[in-house]
Image (tube, rainbow, N blue to C red):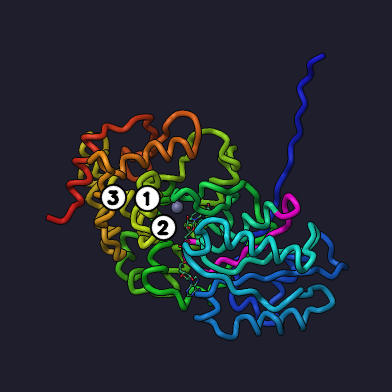
Amino acid sequence: MSSDFGFNVAYRFPVVFTSAMCDPGNNTLRDAITREAPSARHRLLVVVDDGVAGAHPTWASDLQAYVGAHSDALELVCPPVIVPGGERAKHGLDEVIRIVGLVNDYAIDRQSYLVAVGGGAVLDMVSFAAAIAHRGIRVVRIPTTTLAQGDSGFAVKNGVNFFGKKNFVGTFAPPFAVINDALLLETLSARDRRSGLAEAVKVSLLKDPEFFEWLETNAEALDRGVPSLVSEAVHRSAALHLAHICGSGDPFEQSSARPLDFGHWSAHKLEALSGHEVRHGEAVAIGMALDVEYAVRLDVLPRVDGDRILSVLRQLGFTLYHPALVTQTVNGGLALIAGLQEFREHLGGRLHITLLRGIGDPFEVHEIDTPAMMAALQTLTPQ
Ligand SMILES: NC(=O)c1ccc[n+]([C@@H]2O[C@H](COP(=O)([O-])OP(=O)(O)OC[C@H]3O[C@@H](n4cnc5c(N)ncnc54)[C@H](O)[C@@H]3O)[C@@H](O)[C@H]2O)c1
Ligand SMILES: [Zn+2]
């Protein structure tokens, strides 16, 4: 006997933008957690990025006071736990194992919550721990960077770096809720604020030429960090990324295509080659510049569009080069080019690289002309 079996599972989770979420009068966190069981008391294990804890010294005690004020519905199983922020969080499995250990120590079950507060790296690491403990416990994400609020915070995937490769170990698992607090962004360094704007430029180039023009008009003010403009860029970026995740028909990325990953094949490799000295967003800006130069060289993208894109990235403050781009392999080749094969392996199947024909006009190629790519890299190299 042979039969086909199958089932559909619908996922719904709130992505909320608020300000001052720890103010006891702000019901965002309470509502997000209690929405499925309003009369229960919910247990939370909160994990905080050390960069956030350092920049907001009262955040942990404010959260404790918040939970105290909502003690009919919420309970902290222990004081917020601080973890290393940035790529240190994703360096292998050490931090993941620590979080899984805490899940065990505090008897966090599948009706309890891991609450991850931090940049994209901490969210990726804690979400991975949540996905594997008890085969998947609920995770509430509180993104604290422009990149995480505009992109990675509501992503369906998580993971950590392994074998020196980005996100080699990870799962696809939607969050239970995502709460973006605008106040948390105010302490970001210029570098980390800028990083998220690379993903905003990326998604504008793929989906929304008007947004690209807005970024072009406001690039210098965005680089100065004018809060209302940074906030608008983050909102628009989030809306476009969310529309793609929910509307593309492939939220779990089962096809080999990765249409949102413009500029990412080289970005992931550059991050690793630089020993993670380069931030993800910085690497994406360089990766987009490289693929723009490549498309111009192949006469696919008009020079005038290419120049506009490079100019916006530079006005936003990005340096479109890093010495690690020209790291040599033992055989004297360019290590960066190995990133193409690693990107293909990560996605599975055929190579899919997104390029641009124009602003808002992406298309896919399945092979890269290595000499042309090396010539594009040469164009970016300072003389
Ligand atoms: N899951 C996904 O789909 C997805 C998508 C895009 C990026 N990512 C991942 O996200 C990571 C990059 O995230 P990121 O750009 O948010 O940076 P990050 O997480 O590396 O954080 C950068 C620095 O900012 C600090 N920080 C965080 N919030 C702060 C705040 N409010 N005030 C002061 N300092 C603060 C951190 O401690 C860290 O030192 C990469 O690992 C990337 O691979 C994942
Ligand atoms: Zn990215």
Name the residue at 51% across, 69% down: 85
Mark 2 residue's CB less than 8 Å from ligand 1:
yes
> SS for tag 1?
helix
Query: Where does the magenta region start and end?
Result: 133-147
**Of pointers 3 and 1, the one earlier in the residue sequence:** 1
- The circle drawn on residue 267 is 1
Crowd class of label 2 (few under 14; some 14 to 19; many from 20; radius 10 Å): many
| Amino acid on which disc 3 is placed | Ala
Judging depth in this view, the residue of 345 and 301 nearest the camera is: 345
Q: Which mark is residue 280?
A: 2
Quick check: 5 left or right of 53? right
The image quarter in which residue 276 lies: bottom left
Nearer to us in this view, 162 or 352: 162
State yes or no: discs 1 and 2 in contact (Cβ < 8 Å).
yes
Q: Could you say which is closer to the camera, residue 362 or residue 377?
A: 377
Identity, as a three-letter code, of the amino acid under mark 1: Ala
Q: Nearer the viewer, mark 2 or mark 3?
A: 2
The location of residue 111, given as percent across then percent down, is: 81, 60
Q: Is residue 321 visible?
A: no
Residue type pointed to by label 2: His
Q: Earlier in the sequence, mark 2 or mark 3?
A: 2
Classify residue 124 as left or right of residue 27. Answer: left
Q: Quadrant of the C terminus?
A: bottom left
Quick check: 330 above or below 285? above
Residue designated by label 3: 289
The reply to whether the magenta stretch includes residue 144 is yes
Mark 1 close to ligand 2, CB under 8 Å? yes
Q: Quadrant of the N terminus?
A: top right
